[in-house]
Image (tube, grey):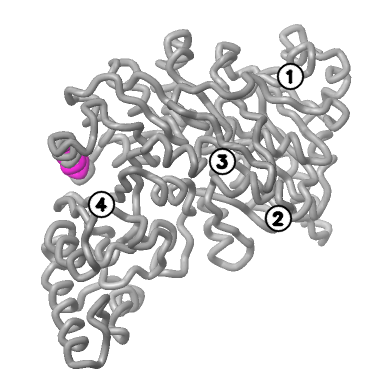
Amino acid sequence: MSPASRVLHPGLRQKIMSAEQAAALIQHGDHVGMSGFTSSGYPKAVPPALARQIEAHNQHGEVFRIGVWTGASTAPELDGALAKVGGIEMRLPYQSDPTCRARINAGEMEYIDIHLSHVSQFVWFGFLGKLNVALVEVAGVLEDGRLLAASSLGNNKTWLDLADKVILEVNSAHALGLEGMHDIYYGTALPPNRKPIPVLHPSSRIGDAYLHVDPAKVVAIVETHIPDRNPKFTPPDEASERIAEHILDFLEHEISRGRLPRELLPIQSGVGNTANAVLSGLNKGKYKGLTAYTEVLQDGMLDMLKSGTLAFASSTALSLSDEGMREFLDNLDYYRERILLRPQEISNHPEVIRRLGVISMNGMIEADMYGNVNSTHLMGTRIMNGIGGSGDFARNAYLSIFMSASTAKNGAISCIVPMASHVDHTEHDVQVIVTEQGLADLRGLAPRQRSKVIIERCAHPSYRAALQDYEDRAQALARSGRAGLHTPHLLREALSWHERYEETGRMLPR
């Protein structure tokens, strides 16, 4: 043990070893539950060591592949390194690595896209098979064996509880000041013995400040000092700023109609520059004392906490830029009183989301004119990232908002289409669609009414006439008795825009 070791439990100190030695304890065919949610709190030493060992097996003509289960996406040192050497047999529940994506779409890696709130319970139910190994990064091990969690929690509690073997990476790059910022609930149970989750406010503390693990299951500890790979955010573009303006105007309208209080309701925001633009807009407004119940805390929410616009934020992970992380660490005492990190089975729990009345804002790839949203697939067949937590929030939110620029690929693709090429969020879960063109409030509207406002308010002008023509002809066909008028479609043309793009590189004829 080095003088600066954070492994304070005497028995567990004896299990400190190199990343290579720890990686050798993972066997071909193992299901490995790894920490990490976005680019925070993921193991940084053992996965690259394991990738090197897998590559050595490959050179000898030996197959070595594992199942990788995480909280959400991770980083190149984990997903990228293992995917590059063909070491992942099955990946779940969410990924964003380009090498992973390429292998999945090439049929070289299996991928299960699961709602983030389902992962932990599916493992407890036994739906996904045996969890052989937990590989979890923590900030320290206390004298009594409790674990000081790192910058994300994700599914770590479940991995530690259920895995046969546990490998810990103790990363001294994480601030010890994180202590007290975690709220790890140990009160869940399997049906029929479940009880209500007692979160009544984003700031409700219902659990323990530390993770627990059976020391007898810990087979290895690897000490590291490697910072999280913090994401880079570019300044919002014009489209993102206009989307933000439309959403802010809508929220003000809801307040004026008495459907929202002046301090709003807890906000949830997906990742990305558009989401940060919305948060920046909220921060520039007249709001004070807002709260957030979300799954990822980005720079935008940190700025809101700093200004007082946001009074409290509950999340499962910090996903900050380098600049945001410096701000967080420089003022850790301030933020510790205003941020809670929870396991994702709680941060994304439908019961809690519905009780708190969350305002959910998430990105989309495309929406069709009836309000069905595709947030995962390009042209219907190629996975982009995954559904993540957007479905957990959309179906249970007080307000469910989806947003995107109206076009992509320099206008070659319309994000408003006659029929979505893949559906993640049905029309039943989508209340508001926003592009830089405008906002469509779909609440209380039947399908043909929805199509009218989506085309008029959200479609790009270059595509509006083609969408209107499709709608007119679909309704004419229905009135002739050859189709139904409830949700009119031209079945032979419904996906023709996507087909044309695949053939010519443009959705509309030249």
Spatial distance from mark 4 to mark 1, Cα to Cα? 44 Å
Spatial distance from mark 3 to mark 4, Cα to Cα? 30 Å
Does residue 425 appear to the left or right of 94 in the view shown? left
Q: Earlier in the sequence, mark 3 or mark 4?
A: 3
Residue wearing tag 1:
146
What residue lies at 57% left-to-right and 54% top-to-bottom?
100
Spatial distance from mark 2 to mark 4, Cα to Cα? 34 Å
Q: Is residue 192 among the parts visible in the rendering?
A: yes
Spatial distance from mark 2 to mark 1, Cα to Cα? 27 Å
Label 2 crowd (10 A; few <14 / some 14-19 / many >=20):
few
**SS at mark 3?**
loop
The stretch of residues the image draws in magenta is 242-249
**SS at mark 4?**
strand
Q: Is residue 90 magenta?
A: no
**SS at mark 2?**
loop
> Where is residue 298 shown, x and y percent of the image?
40, 30
Label 1 crowd (10 A; few <14 / some 14-19 / many >=20):
some
Q: Earlier in the sequence, mark 3 or mark 1?
A: 3
Residue wearing tag 2:
128
Q: Amino acid at mark 4?
A: Val
